[in-house]
């Protein structure tokens, strides 16, 4: 390899301190998370992040291979997307999501059909690039007892906050969201 | 839920004792594992299995949703397959596998194409049902430092040992195996 390995495992820590100020913690479906004043993002497992003793919750997720995106879609996404950490992106959202057993019992073709043919998940996300930068973290296969299946992370400018509302609203109205049985929406600023 | 949760996380422990006797430990691609006399399978994480102090290696894997199987294939598999633990199945194999970065950079359609259109991975496995029972465990998303991506586990009778050689030989000759950069073949009996 010519480049050092990119971190894959991240821990999101809600607590008294952190780089992001929590503006709102809202349950969308199912149980919420305890309110925290701030959020930190640590590129490490929960064990490594243990020094942050003021945590009221910790959620771990790992960046993995893409599960639904096809080559033509990937090319379109890569051509438009920008990375996390842009200085003007002073708004963020952490949206942990769990899908129900019916979703996980679907076969690959069935999940892809709901995800894109019915719900246009990729096409909708593409519409908001490059304004809304995102990173998807998987939790389901970290272990058998994770509280969520995914941690979705978004960054955008204050001027794009309305576009972000459109994005999440459109996805929540899609057939894919019938399979969501827990979702918490945490809004952040810095 | 009407049934208790089925265990998803398993730890395979190579050591001085265990339900299975190790007949052979052979590197197929890349680095082998230290030879162990016996193998135990624990339905728990490595932490829970810590009492087995004689371990020479431990490998964890989690049963997850299927990544490539489509509905018609799933129906065909379910109709023919039988479970693990059949008393006559006194032969087993644990084959840990790691795929290379090129595999994980493929999009879903590209991986499916190599997996089934080029390599007929599902069709080949179906041919050996119900004789060869199997369970696939994923490791790649347990954390960033797992030594393998998958732990494949097979059980069969002594009479089907030849069929099992055909199965693994056919898969190793397939285009999918060009992406395998580490594979160890551990043969077991009880």
Image (spheres, coloured by chain):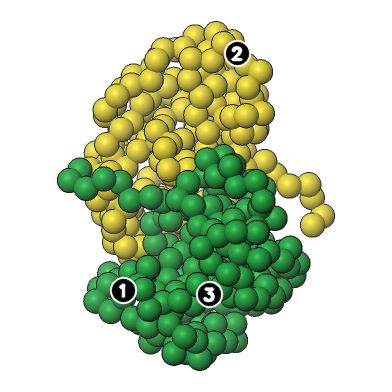
Chain colours: A yellow, B green
* Residue at the disc numbered 1: B82
Cα–Cα span, label 1 and label 2: 49 Å
> In the rendering, which numbered label is found on residue B151?
none
Q: Is residue B126 visible?
A: no
Q: Which residue is at a point 70% across and 44% down the rendered structure image?
A: A6
Instruction: Name the chain letter of the residue that bears numbered label 1.
Output: B
Nearest-to-viewer mark from 1 and 2: 1
Instruction: Judge left or right: residue B55 versus residue A160.
Output: right
Q: Seen in the image, is B151 located left or right of residue A171?
A: right
Mark with earlier residue (3, 1): 1
Asked if A183 appears above or below B177 in the picture, the reply is above
Instruction: Please state, as top left, top right, bottom left or bottom right, where the C terminus of chain A lies in the image.
Output: top right
Nearest the eye: A148 or B105:
A148
Q: Residues within 10 Å of mark 2 (few under 14, many from 20)?
A: few
**Residue at mark 2:** A53
Mark 2 vs mark 3: tell me if same chain.
Answer: no
Residue designated by label 3:
B189
Q: Position of residue B14 (x, y in %)?
A: 63, 59
Q: Nearer the viewer, mark 2 or mark 3?
A: 3
**To which chain does the residue with label 3 belong?**
B
Q: Position of residue A97 (x, y in %)?
A: 37, 35
Residue A181 point in image, percent of width and height? 27, 36
Q: Secondary structure at mark 3?
A: strand
Helix, strand or loop status at disc 1:
loop
């Amino acid at each position: 390899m010519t480049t050092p390995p990119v971190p894959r495992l991240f821990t999101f820590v809600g607590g008294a301190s952190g780089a992001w100020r929590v503006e709102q913690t809202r349950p969308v479906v199912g149980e919420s998370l305890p309110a925290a004043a701030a959020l930190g993002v640590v590129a490490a497992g929960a064990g490594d992040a243990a020094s942050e003793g003021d945590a009221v919750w910790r959620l771990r997720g790992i960046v993995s291979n893409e599960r639904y995106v096809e080559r033509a879609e990937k090319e379109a996404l890569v051509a438009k997307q920008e990375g996390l950490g842009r200085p003007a992106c002073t708004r963020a959202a952490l949206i942990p999501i769990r899908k129900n057993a019916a979703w996980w019992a679907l076969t690959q073709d069935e999940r892809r059909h709901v995800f894109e043919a019915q719900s246009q998940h990729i096409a909708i996300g593409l519409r908001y690039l490059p304004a809304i930068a995102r990173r998807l973290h998987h939790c389901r296969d970290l272990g058998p007892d994770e509280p969520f299946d995914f941690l979705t992370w978004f960054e955008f400018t204050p001027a794009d906050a309305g576009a972000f509302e459109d994005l999440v609203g459109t996805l929540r109205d899609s057939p894919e969201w019938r399979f969501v049985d827990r979702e918490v929406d945490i809004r952040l600023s810095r």
